[in-house]
């Protein structure tokens, strides 16, 4: 499953799931863009780790919710590695509140990054992905988009919004032999999960048949498969990677 000579852009790759995806793709030969918003040191560490393992990587700062910054990132990507073959829309955030406390601002912040960012990046790289030999658009959703989750009306809405977006882009890319798929992780041990109170984490754990949270690497391997040639005939799908939770 080599990704040799494939240009792969991973948004939000300074930490957590994005970092694991970037390293996994780099380990399999891809030229990797490590996007980040503010964690400069961690993004550089991720790129260095990929290079030390024999791969190619470049960190590029861009807030995915800002179209001008995303367009500049797409230009820098082409200068560094040529047009993108794979875009992993991974960058995401939460602002958790019960709905009766949620303000319009809390709603908009999460929409701007989790859906606005996906629009911006998919738009800026769309021609690259369409014209690539088997381009891959991979959107990181969540089991929360499938089940809903207490205190996450804004976040859950963005994550289920990705399903319609992915299926539509799958149709629009199919005639060019490029694919669009969603990976929907369950609960993964990252900084994002750390923000969930411990007693809530314990309750979540009771709902996971495999009886553990995912590691970022559990998700990265699936993304690498979707990015690879082995997934050529799969498009418009939601891959649930959640330890067996029902949805
Ligand atoms: P995380 O540890 O909080 O890391 C978030 C990453 O996204 C960081 O690299 C961050 O960059 C980046 N980011 C945030 N806002 C950004 C923006 N506006 N522009 C560019 N980059 C931005 O999160 P994670 O747990 O790895 O989650 C990654 C993805 O998986 C998200 O889409 C999340 O919704 C999804 N997911 C997570 C879980 C989970 O349990 N953790 C489960 C299902 C799905 P900086 O460090 O520079 O801010």
Image: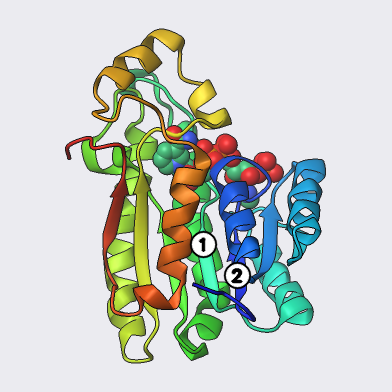
Are the residues flagged by discs 2 and 1 in contact, CB closer than 8 Å? Answer: yes
Taking the image as drawn, is residue 111 in sight?
no
Task: Residue 175 in the image: state x and y as whole percent.
Answer: 32, 91
Residue 52 in percent (x, y) is at 80, 57
Residue 32 placement, left or right of 171: right
Residue at figure coordinates x 50%, y 81% from the top left: 129
In the image, what residue occupies the spot 32% across and 33% down? 153
From the image, tell me which residue sits under label 2: 8
The percent position of residue 152, horizontal first and vertical second, equals 36, 30
* Quarter of the rendered structure image containing ligand 1: top right
Residue 16 — which label? Answer: none
Question: In the drawing, does residue 15 fall left or right of residue 131?
Answer: right
Q: Which residue is mark 1?
A: 88
Residue 131 visible here: yes
Looking at mark 1, is its residue's CB closer than 8 Å to ligand 1?
Answer: no
Tell me the quarter of the picture where residue 50 sits: bottom right
Q: Residue at x 35, y 79 (%)?
A: 232
Which colouring convention does the figure follow?
A: rainbow
Q: Is residue 186 left or right of residue 196?
A: left
Q: Secondary structure at mark 2?
A: strand
Rendered position, 137 above or below 134: above
SS class, disc 1: strand
> Residue drawn at (46%, 86%), measured in percent from left and top?
130
For label 2, the crowd category at 10 Å Cα-Cα, with few meaning under 14, some 14 to 19 and many 20 or more, is many
Q: Residue furthest left?
A: 246
**Residue nearest the viewer, comparing 187 with 119:** 187
Q: Quadrant of residue 85?
A: bottom right
């Amino acid at each position: 499953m080599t990704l040799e000579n494939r240009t792969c852009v991973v948004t939000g790759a300074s930490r957590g799931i994005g970092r694991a995806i970037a390293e996994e793709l780099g380990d399999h030969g891809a030229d990797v863009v490590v996007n980040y918003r503010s964690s400069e040191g961690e993004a550089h560490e991720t790129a260095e780790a990929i290079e030390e393992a024999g791969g190619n990587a470049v960190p590029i700062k861009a807030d995915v919710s800002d179209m001008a910054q995303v367009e500049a990132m797409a230009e820098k990507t082409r200068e560094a590695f040529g047009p993108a073959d794979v875009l992993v829309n991974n960058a995401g955030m939460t602002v958790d509140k019960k709905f009766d406390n949620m303000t319009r601002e809390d709603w908009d912040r999460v929409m701007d990054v989790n859906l606005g960012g996906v629009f911006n990046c998919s738009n800026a790289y769309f021609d690259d992905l369409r014209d690539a030999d088997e381009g891959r658009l991979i959107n990181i959703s969540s089991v929360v988009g499938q089940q809903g989750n207490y205190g996450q009306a804004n976040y859950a809405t963005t994550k289920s919004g990705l399903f319609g977006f992915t299926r539509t882009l799958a149709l629009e890319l199919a005639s060019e032999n490029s694919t669009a798929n969603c990976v929907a992780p369950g609960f993964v041990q990252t900084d994002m999960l750390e923000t969930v109170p411990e007693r809530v984490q314990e309750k979540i754990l009771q709902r996971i048949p495999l009886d553990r949270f995912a590691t970022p690497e559990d998700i990265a391997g699936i993304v690498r498969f979707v990015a690879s040639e082995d997934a050529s005939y799969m498009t418009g799908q939601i891959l649930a990677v959640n330890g067996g939770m029902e949805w």
